[in-house]
Image: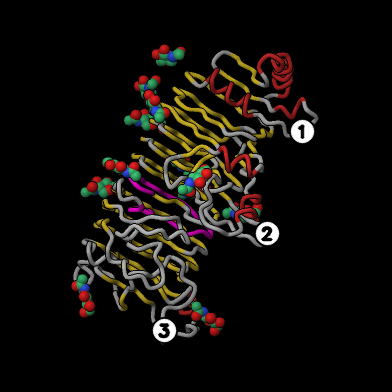
Amino acid sequence: MPSKMKTTLLTLAALFAAAQAWIVNEGTKCFLYPESLTHFNLPVDDTESIQKAFELCGTNGTVIFTKYTFHVASVIKTLDLINCDVELHGDIVFSTNVPYWLSHSINVGLQNQSTAWLIGGTNVSFVGRGGLIDGNGQTWYDENRDNSNQPGRPITITFFNSTNLFVDGLSIIQPQFWAIFVSYSQNVTMNNIYVNATTNSNYGIVNTDGADTWNSRDIVMRNWTVQNGDDCIAAKGNTTNLYVQNVTCHGGSGLTIGSVGQYPLTPDYDENILFEDITILGSMDGTYIKTWQGVNVDDTGNGGAGGGGSGLVRNITFRRIHMEDVALPIQITQCIYTESGSDICDTSRMQIRDVTFEDISGTSRYNIAASLHCASLHPCPDVFFKNVSIKSINETLGLPLYNTPLQHEVFQCANIVNQNSTSGIPCNHWAPGDFGQGVSANVR
Ligand SMILES: *[C@@H]1O[C@H](CO)[C@@H](O)[C@H](O)[C@H]1NC(C)=O
Ligand SMILES: *[C@@H]1O[C@H](CO)[C@@H](O)[C@H](O)[C@H]1NC(C)=O
Ligand SMILES: *[C@@H]1O[C@H](CO)[C@@H](O)[C@H](O)[C@H]1NC(C)=O
Ligand SMILES: *[C@@H]1O[C@H](CO)[C@@H](O)[C@H](O)[C@H]1NC(C)=O
Ligand SMILES: *[C@@H]1O[C@H](CO)[C@@H](O)[C@H](O)[C@H]1NC(C)=O
Ligand SMILES: *[C@@H]1O[C@H](CO)[C@@H](O)[C@H](O)[C@H]1NC(C)=O
Ligand SMILES: *[C@@H]1O[C@H](CO)[C@@H](O)[C@H](O)[C@H]1NC(C)=O
Ligand SMILES: *[C@@H]1O[C@H](CO)[C@@H](O)[C@H](O)[C@H]1NC(C)=O
Ligand SMILES: *[C@@H]1O[C@H](CO)[C@@H](O)[C@H](O)[C@H]1NC(C)=O
Ligand SMILES: *[C@@H]1O[C@H](CO)[C@@H](O)[C@H](O)[C@H]1NC(C)=O
Ligand SMILES: *[C@@H]1O[C@H](CO)[C@@H](O)[C@H](O)[C@H]1NC(C)=O
Ligand SMILES: *[C@@H]1O[C@H](CO)[C@@H](O)[C@H](O)[C@H]1NC(C)=O
């Protein structure tokens, strides 16, 4: 924006400030300015102005976060927007008042998770124009002390109940928890997204998923870069018709279907999902499908209580995936959170079928490329490997693998209906049902 125009707007803004905080409302456009500009740069909460701007311009209008830093110390709820464009020229920074967020984050209906910003409507666009969202996550990484899901720890932004949603150029740094959640939405396009959770302390960045989808359909995600400490992109229950293309995942735990089958009363259906042209670097997992076991247990040590849910995972394709230094490149498990020697791992009520891994290349951190265990109660038909070539880093360097007699790459299988016939999977080992998602040594 030309500086002269900016000055005019600022003058206008100053005039309007008393009456309606920091919104300059020009016709269908609402220009937002942060309170800090009139408060000696102090981080005064801008939530009220933001809410007001969406009230004024949330229908047939444009909400413009101008090129300043906005402070958000309260939950934001901007729903039922209609034909609304949101432009992010400046930065939105969330406060670190942990007790406030733990008691005020908005529940999103899945796993008792909650969010700091719930946004949605019909024909909504949210476009980054040089600005970003900063979740100030270091505080959360430190206070959570490497523990798992923490009730009330907020998802940065949740797109909810939306039809025809277009998100472009959104950057989220230091998300408090999951960065992006998409729920109860359809026809969602999210392109050119950047998520980066990095810790500078001894505590890790657990649960900083890039994006999770749930109860949503017809979703396209292209051109993403994610650096984080959990799922890069995860299709949770009732994700249908998801297309993900051109994503680079750094660290974290890769591309995920699930976890699904957590709740006995609500079946999960994940169908028609395609990931392609993806690079996965230094991650714990690469491409995987994870369901809970069929018995409901209170396994609070990992992911909360659950299991016993039914449903279907069908028509899933991972194509043109390149991995480097991934601990567990390919996995199907039906007992994701019941690790180390459980006898209930073959009980899953979820059916998995029609899964293709195609043109998968690169290196594994250990001697294992794939662990595919379908529950004996529900063997998986039509699982295919086409041109899958993964070698351990040591094999590529001509070095032996430490502390294992298995010096060849392990592809372990169990209960894949076509594993000995059409699958193309070079099964050379038995896959235990309780093989976890966290691999930290060579298979022996
Ligand atoms: C918004 O625009 C639509 C289509 O142009 C129109 O039908 C509707 O009345 C408008 N709504 C408001 C509140 O102006
Ligand atoms: C949403 O956009 C579509 C296509 O432009 C339009 O037909 C429809 O009326 C819009 N919906 C609303 C609620 O304005
Ligand atoms: C659900 O989350 C709320 C906070 O968001 C917390 O007070 C409550 O204890 C949680 N419930 C369970 C069962 O974890
Ligand atoms: C979802 O959006 C529709 C309009 O598309 C609205 O009528 C309904 O109230 C919204 N539901 C919730 C729970 O917000
Ligand atoms: C889907 O949403 C896009 C905006 O991302 C819109 O242009 C398109 O018209 C929508 N498609 C349908 C079928 O409404
Ligand atoms: C993520 O942020 C860290 C710290 O700022 C930086 O070193 C790293 O390069 C970033 N990662 C990506 C993929 O941009
Ligand atoms: C993906 O990024 C490339 C390079 O910046 C760009 O040309 C292309 O338009 C982007 N695709 C989408 C869908 O935005
Ligand atoms: C893929 O997405 C990245 C951004 O994550 C972009 O820089 C790159 O140009 C895209 N590649 C293509 C071929 O569109
Ligand atoms: C998924 O959709 C089915 C209906 O298609 C519904 O019965 C079930 O409750 C949904 N699951 C969740 C977790 O909402
Ligand atoms: C499988 O999913 C793809 C999209 O990834 C879709 O084009 C195709 O029609 C689906 N096939 C079936 C049989 O549902
Ligand atoms: C790879 O070889 C190095 C050097 O011999 C060894 O220290 C390391 O443990 C090996 N890595 C694995 C995964 O076995
Ligand atoms: C595949 O062959 C192995 C080894 O002979 C056998 O243990 C396994 O039961 C067979 N699996 C299937 C699904 O046929």
| Pointers 1 and 2 in contact (C-beta within 8 Å) | no
Q: Residue at x 51, y 19 (%)?
A: 61
Q: Which residue is mark 3?
A: 407
Frontmost residue, 115 versus 372: 115
Q: Which residue is mark 2?
A: 201
The residue carrying pointer 3 sits among few (fewer than 14), some (14 to 19) or many (20 or more) residues within 10 Å by Cα, namely some
Q: Which residue is mark 1?
A: 42
Q: Which mark is residue 191?
A: none
The residue carrying pointer 1 sits among few (fewer than 14), some (14 to 19) or many (20 or more) residues within 10 Å by Cα, namely few
Please name the amino acid that badge 3 sits on. Gln
CA–CA distance in space, label 2 to label 3:
37 Å
* In the image, residue 250 lies in the stretch drawn in magenta: yes
Q: Earlier in the sequence, mark 3 or mark 1?
A: 1
Please name the amino acid that badge 2 sits on. Ser
Query: Which element carries disc 2, helix, strand or loop?
Result: loop
The residue carrying pointer 2 sits among few (fewer than 14), some (14 to 19) or many (20 or more) residues within 10 Å by Cα, namely few
Q: Residue at x 55, y 39 (%)?
A: 105
Please name the amino acid that badge 1 sits on. Leu
Q: Is residue 212 left or right of residue 22?
A: left
CA–CA distance in space, label 3 to label 1:
60 Å
Q: Which residues are magenta?
A: 236-262
Which numbered disc, 3 or 1, marks the residue closer to the eye?
A: 1
